[in-house]
Amino acid sequence: MNSEATAIWTECLRVIEKHVNEQSFSTWFKPISPARIEGSVLTIQVPSQFFYEWLEDNYVDVLKLAIKTVLGANGRLEYAVVVDKGNSQNQPYMVSYPQGVSSPAGKKKKEVLAAANSPFDLSSLDEETTLQSNLSSNYTFSSFIEGDCNRLARSAGFAVANKPGITSFNPLMVYGGVGLGKTHLVQAIGNEIKNGPEDKFVLYVSSEKFVNQFMDGIKDGNIKSFTNFYMQVDVLIIDDIQFLAGKGRTQEMFFHIFNHLHQNKKQIIMTSDCAPKDLMGLEERLLSRFKWGLTADLQMPDFETRIAIIRKKMQSEGITIPNNVIEYLAYTVDTNVRELEGVMISLIAHASLNRVEISLDLAKTIMKNIVKDIETEVSIEYIQKSCSDYYGIKVEELKAKTRKKEIVIARQVAMYFSKEFTNHSLKSIGYHFGGRDHSTVIHAVQSVNDLMETDTNFRNAIQEQKKQFKIRSY
Ligand SMILES: Nc1ncnc2c1ncn2[C@@H]1O[C@H](COP(=O)(O)OP(=O)(O)OP(=O)(O)O)[C@@H](O)[C@H]1O
């Protein structure tokens, strides 16, 4: 082994060690051996292609930092990937990496340090240092499907991403139920800013982590570093703010950080599982500040948006599935997007483990195992789609004002099924049919019952249609 390369790599490891936790260090850096140094190009040998990809995905910044610190601005890193056990390939597998290090003219981004051991210690890093921001690169605007359910939040988020701290959406508060895309959206904003032209210090942190860091700060007598760290941020994204409920001291600290950032036109983005007015256990002065900016909610995506989400996810996995399966999943999973994804993953896993095609039958089997009481879980949307297909009209026509006879019948039947197969109140059913009132629903149910008594064909058709709701399949 080249002793000069060894000495350089040892120096690099010293830098790396400061910025990753012990476990990551022994898992991902100890197995690396230095192969050679040629000029300012250090070649390291990694055990596998997977290992190399993992380093690139997760530790590119810290590697850049190490190379730059030890070899200077012109330093570069190359890899040699071991192809077979005990048989190393001496040709570098990848060249001209890391880019940021090999092109000193390139502008460095000031990002956020997420070094596990010393989260607030910025002292060893200069202005140009590339750090992490705790953002997942998968969460982008392009992978976030737009629909009525998220339009306001998404466009406000986009405006903030283009002018952080400058729009009146400061703070931006995104709220909504479990698994509806809050984290995805706020991280998309963070990624957009981070990849944008300005050099912004973006930090994403969960409220839980914020609380823990604050507690650690108190324990270690290190509160000043904690506060200084957060006050340096240009864009603070804090997830699940409801977690601060009842934690008075943390709230007080957050209040000061919030004020400081806001006064300095720094962007604050928050998420919560409920509307600010329902956030119990948060101080009034904090809640009143949340109202300074914009509050936007996320709802469960409607059927069409769910279809688009499934298509997008499948496309990103490189998997094609039949349309009727996509529709079936979109119909049946109307709780939240995370569950929808869970079902998709199960479906893909079953198909690949059992080496079978993804089919409607497979989807039904999986759904039966995953969703309890599936027979009773019929949504109004499902009924509307089914009835409009049956009568050959559009779903919108069921909700519209039109009084054309065939549409009135289809609408009444759909209301009748909604009353029979869902737990919605008459008022809620009316609302789903273009904002009609409950007496219209009562009238619809009565009319369908009357018609079934007098018209055998109609009764048979209704019985036939009912089956699909009972077995929840089509
Ligand atoms: N509109 C959307 N387009 C594409 N994917 C979405 C959309 N909404 C949610 N998702 C996906 O659904 C999953 C759950 O979203 P996310 O974790 O952001 O939800 P959340 O509201 O933050 O949940 P929690 O309340 O549990 O924190 C993620 O994988 C996300 O990518």
Image (cartoon, rainbow, N blue to C red):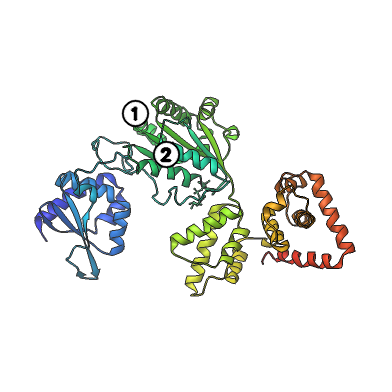
Classify 10 Å Cα crowding around label 2: few (below 14), some (14-19), many (20 and above).
many
Residue depicted at x 29% and y 36%: 121
**Residue 206: x and y, percent?**
45, 41
In the picture provided, is 95 more to the left or to the right than 163?
left
Amino acid carrying label 2: it is Ala
**Residue 354: x and y, percent?**
50, 74
Q: Secondary structure at mark 2?
A: helix
Classify residue 204 by image quadrant. top left
Point out the frontmost of discs 1 and 2: 2
**Which residue matches tag 2?**
161
Amino acid carrying label 1: it is Lys
Tell me, yes or no, whether the two marked residues, 1 and 2, touch with CB atoms within 8 Å.
no
Q: Residue furthest right?
A: 454
Residue depicted at x 23% and y 36%: 126
Residue 224, numbered circle: 1
Residue 341 visible to the viewer:
no
Residue 133 or residue 427, whichever sits in front: 427
- Disc 1 to disc 2, C-alpha distance: 29 Å
